[in-house]
Image (cartoon, rainbow, N blue to C red):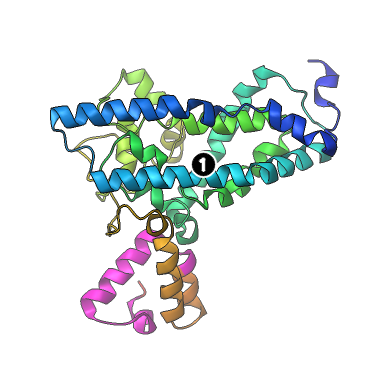
Amino acid sequence: MDEAFFCAPAIPIDRIWTIEQQAPNLILWAAPAILLITAIELVVTYIQEKPYYEKWETLGSLLVGLGSLVVGAGIKFSLLYGVIWIYNQLPWRMALSWWTLIPCYLIFDFFSYWAHRVSHENRFWWATHVVHHSGEHYNLSVSFRLSWIQNLKIIFFLPVAFVGFHPIVFFTVSQLAVLFQFWVHTEYIHKLPRWIEFIFATPSNHRVHHGSQEKYIDKNFGATFIFWDRLFGTYQPEEERPVYGITTNIDQKANPFHINFHELQDIIRDVKQAKGFRQKWFYAFGSPVEVARRKQRMSQQAVTPQDADSLVG
């Protein structure tokens, strides 16, 4: 490989606008097709009288998705500037070459697996992800449920930027990864050929991830590739039909602010009521599953968070 490939020139800050224009806005371009396909699924669901959509929940998904687009557009420049700054500090900067999309995508998906997994195992990060799981029906509109604060998880993808991929490649891959996840949110595609199910996060594999049954909770984190789950012991095949939603489903199904921030509100309330640093830390950063179990036991025993030390186990 040409040595100059890893010695690409730094990007002058005054050219950042040029880079922004060169970075394709794939999600914006794909939005009309995504909305059309979702509308087709909704109409087919209605004609077939399938219980895949609920009007208030679907409205909530649309409003959350619209807000996510606005937030993403608002911080795009800051994220681009940050990635360019990292790129300029590296002595092994890669030149812009479209074949680097392949290794970048694979590395990006690896860190996506871990970002996703941490988002299920740590309550603070769960608050940036729970919006995606709050729907009690599984359909293409669920893919619109992207948290307005999900961009905090950019820190999990900094290692990808430090590999030295060109910023345009980095942002193209990040958009492709989001677009791939659209089609897996449907009940109309059943199990695909075995080799596809073994490699990719298919609708069947991802339906498991959205299931609230004990055997399905915290399984199948892979965004594009499911072999990460097979490798790290979090794979679960789809067996019985998943029961969608979270362990305590929300009531304001069409309110995008409640959908986005109800978990943060719960964290703040729980931390305020908890006694001692250990309990406050647990309610802020503990496992969401363990927090839910603790709160359930407290409810059954009619105790307050101040008494929760006696329930540690």
Locate residue 269: give its quadrant: bottom left
Task: Inspect this view and state whether residue 22 appears.
Answer: yes
Left or right position of 303 against 32: left
Residue at point 35%, 24% (across, down):
197
Q: Position of residue 56 (x, y in %)?
A: 27, 48
The secondary structure making up most of the magenta span is: helix
**Residue 295 lies in the magenta stretch:** yes
**Residue 138 lies in the magenta stretch:** no
Number of marks in picture: 1
Amino acid carrying label 1: it is Leu
Q: Nearer the viewer, residue 194 or 253?
A: 253
The quadrant of the picture occupied by the C terminus is bottom left
Q: Position of residue 285 (x, y in %)?
A: 49, 64
Locate residue 50: give its quadrant: top left
Q: Position of residue 248 (x, y in %)?
A: 28, 60
Task: Inspect this view and state whether residue 114 appears.
Answer: no
Q: Is residue 50 above or below residue 154?
A: above
Residue at point 32%, 45% (across, down):
59
Q: Determine which residue is flagged by label 1.
A: 69
Residue at point 41%, 40% (across, down):
144
Residue farthest top in this picture: 1
Q: Position of residue 255 (x, y in %)?
A: 35, 55
Q: Is residue 257 above or below residue 5?
A: below
Residue numbers of the magenta segment: 284-311
Q: Which SS class for mark 1?
A: helix
Q: Is residue 93 above or below residue 291?
A: above
Query: Few, some or many C-alpha atoms within 10 Å of disc 1 (few <14, some 14-19, many ≥20)?
Result: some
Q: Is residue 123 above or below residue 86?
A: below
The quadrant of the picture occupied by the N terminus is top right
Left or right position of 36 against 179: left
